[in-house]
Amino acid sequence: MIELVIGSLATGWTTLCNYLAEHVITCLIPAFFIAGAIATLVRKDGVLKYFSPDAKKTVSYGVASVSGTILAVCSCTILPMFAGILKKGSGIGPAITFLYAGPAINILAVIYTAKVLGPDIGIARAASAIILSIIIGLVMALLFRDDDHGKGERKKDVHIPGEKMERPRWTIPVFFIFLVSILLVATSNLDMLIRLFIVYTLSMAISFLLIFYFSRDEVTEWGCEIWDLTKKIFPILLAGTFTLGMISYFLPPAFFTPFIGDNSLFSNFIASLLGAILYMPTLLEVPVIGTTFGYLSGNMAKGPALALLLTGPAISLPSLLVLLRIMNMKKTGVYAALVIVLSTLAGYVFGNSGL
């Protein structure tokens, strides 16, 4: 018994140390800085105002489908935001698109997925989430179109505050380019000294912009956003990765191979169901797929991996219970069914595409 405990603890510790060494400095820290900058500098009211039933569909669904990268929300944060925009008079279609896409293409999750599981599945996750969110929103709007009648009149124009500080228009785009460049350089295969030099140079350029083109309040708010994201996500990620390592000691990845080891329709459906049942905090779905289910060791096929990534952040038993209170049983059931079916199909197509 003692040997089992010691063995599982040792496996959990080894798994955690490997993830910390490979991904924290080069991936997660730059990603937290980018997500904090998005939360600080992108005006949320300017995004949410496009969700009215009277707004052009190309605009409302387009904005809703990419909202996750803009708002950097997680699977728990999205629920009160979804309830809020529905209460303010949003159409059911754009609201559902926002509900699905928000956590699915969270900038942190997409970057972490690409770094750990590979660029192909990271890109597939982002692209599939955008496409599926629009399809699910349109189907929900068609099925429940009677609920949107009269909402457009209740929707008032949202006041968009002006910039916090007057500055040239190029400042913010360049600021984000520098931040993303640090991420790309840090995760590249360049020589360590070259990477350090480039990251140092870019950091000095960012410091110059912060000193001369951003107010002290904006810089402080950026730091607060980074800290808020870090304290919410990082401890859970550490504890979850350690726990998953312990689980892998008793249930090695080979155990799941008969169920999710190929790209068949059945395997993708099983993976979608697992994603719908399990509750995985933001980012934890990546080590779950990579380590517990064995994607990195070849025991899980890439189709089921994508299917689980597309269902996990969108629905889980706890989130479905909350949605029952926000919507009703019929809408919640239809939404869950659409997510599972479309994620299964997306995983099947991706797994058999040869990409």
Image (cartoon, rainbow, N blue to C red):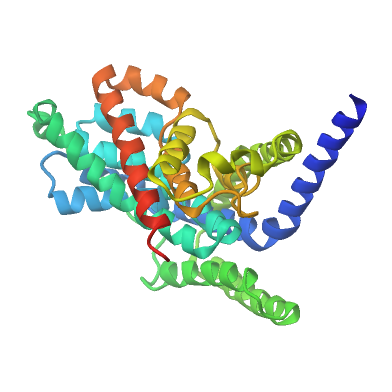
**Image quadrant where one finds the N terminus:** top right
For the point 54% across and 72% down, the residue is: 181
* In front of the other: 81 or 238: 238
**Image quadrant where one finds the C terminus:** bottom left
* 262 displayed left or right of 341: right
For the point 49% across and 69% down, the residue is: 175
Q: Position of residue 21 (x, y in %)?
A: 75, 57
Q: Quadrant of residue 206?
A: bottom right
* 35 displayed left or right of 146: right
Q: Position of residue 34 (x, y in %)?
A: 52, 58
Q: Quadrant of residue 257?
A: top right
* 42 displayed left or right of 140: right
Q: Position of residue 145 (x, y in %)?
A: 11, 31
* In front of the other: 30 or 5: 5
Q: Quadrant of residue 248?
A: top right
* In front of the other: 48 or 254: 254
Above-or-below relation of 288 to 302: above
* 265 displayed left or right of 40: left
Residue furthest front in the image: 258
Residue 160 visible in rendering: no
* In front of the other: 9 or 233: 9
